[in-house]
Image (cartoon, rainbow, N blue to C red):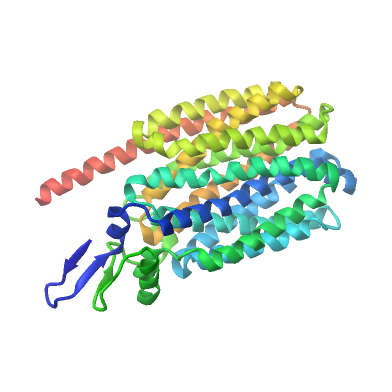
Amino acid sequence: MLGRSSQMTQETVNVGRLIDDRPMGRLQVLTIALCALVNMLDGVDTQSIGVAAPFIAETMGVPITSFGPVFSAALLGAALGAIGFGALADRLGRKRLLVVALFLMSAFTLLTAHAPDFTWLLVYRFLAGLGLGGATPCFIALTSEYAPARHRSACVTLMWSGFPLGAMIGALANSALLESHGWRAIFYLGGVLPLVLAAVVIVWLPESLKFLVTRGFDGAARRVIARMGVALGPNTALVTDERPAGAPLRQVFAQGRALATFVLWVPFFTSMGILTVAVLWTPSLLRLNGISPAATAFVVAFNGLGAFVGQAVCGRLIERVGTVPALMPAFVLGALVTAGLGYGASSVPAAATFIGLNGLFLGFASAGAIALAARLYPTPVRSSGVGLGMAMGRFGQMVGPLVAGWMLSSGFTAGQIMLAIGSTAMIGAAFVVWFHILMTREKADAGAAQVRIG
């Protein structure tokens, strides 16, 4: 961690090893906790539109089968936001872009409550999605860069469990709001929360220490290190093993990462797409079967509970047993329970059971994809790399509801819809194996190169 330069008696501190070699301190725990809170907002928003959709459709006088584009509008915005904000965050800073994303999220979620017609509803959902998606690569990168390497997978997946926790809490809150204040209250709550959290982030969240050093912000980096409880001498130089990337999006595919990047996109696409179809369309399927609004919101809460458990344990399990033994069963079982959800949509107990298991297995799978991405990319391109992966996941979230809506309007049954959507998890499982093979070969090649150099 500490060293001496060869030409002058100047101490150096490698900030990467400073984080990796020390026990996790309060600032690191605070950073990861705040990132999890921001992630909870995404969970609150995703289930909110699904729960509110039948009532918005009644208010606007449009059929619920036309809501596929509404579900996908925010997700298209989120996909574009993840790409754009991820690249900007690697240049301008994770914290700064996270605050901008929270303000976007707040403004357009509040406007959703007063959308005058179907077209404006689409516009507001798209723009709110830009904020939702833009926040994601920022808080994933911050979590990854403040977590010690030995606990990085566990910290990232534990932070990501904030999404289903937000979905679960939001579903329960929305159940009460629907009964007492109507569907607009859901979006009032969803719009105020990001505004409050933006203020907290501005005051308490540190910028990425590795980003500050790679970009030459020495004074800001020293202030963060002081908050970590580490005293530096006046002549101490801060260094890192990584250097700024000239063009982060292009550098994502450099140094042999191109194929691994493309392969990893498929688990992102399938796991997040299937999970979102279950959350967004199950309330409408239950409503078509005569289930009450409060009961539908209650059922969706089980998805959040299952996903919270799955994502909370994912990183630790990957660290213990490896990528394939942890993620393969999650994808395969996710396919089976998603099919079961379609055939159990006429009963509250059955739907709650299957949607809970859907959240457990596919929440686990999506968290695993995120953890793998955080490990694949170095600091200068981590936000960009994770942002691209999340964008592919968002595209899956966008395509899945559109396909489900088309199938529903074409006369397919709920069972047929969920069977078709769930079966794509098997493709995700195959690509997890492929990614593992690529990473194993890369490690073997790196080891052989070191032997030749030695």
Q: Nearer the viewer, residue 288 or 422?
A: 288
User: Residue at coordinates 73% horizontally, 44% vertically from top-left?
Assistant: 173
Q: Is residue 109 visible?
A: yes
Query: x%, y% of residue 85?
Result: 54, 62
Which of the 4 image quadrants contains residue 212?
bottom left
Of all residues shown, which one is farthest toward the left?
454
Report if residue 246 is visible in the image: no
**Closer to the camera, 345 or 390?**
345
Does 53 sit left or right of 328 as displayed? right
Q: Quadrant of the N terminus?
A: bottom left
Q: Position of residue 291 (x, y in %)?
A: 81, 29
- 292, 406: nearer the viewer: 292
Which image quadrant is residue 54 in? top right
Q: What residue do we see at 33% from left, 49% from top?
A: 149
Q: Nearer the viewer, residue 443 or 364?
A: 364
Does 84 appear above or below 367? below
Residue 328, position as x, y percentages in the image: 44, 28
Which residue is at 32% across, 57% downward? 19
How many numbered discs sit on the rendered protein?
0
Is residue 70 toward the left or the right of residue 313 in the image?
right
User: How far across and how far down the image is residue 437, in percent?
Assistant: 33, 35
Determine whether, in the image, residue 201 is placed left or right of residue 117. Answer: left
- Residue at 62% across / 50% down in the picture? 42
- Left-right relation of 53 to 424: right
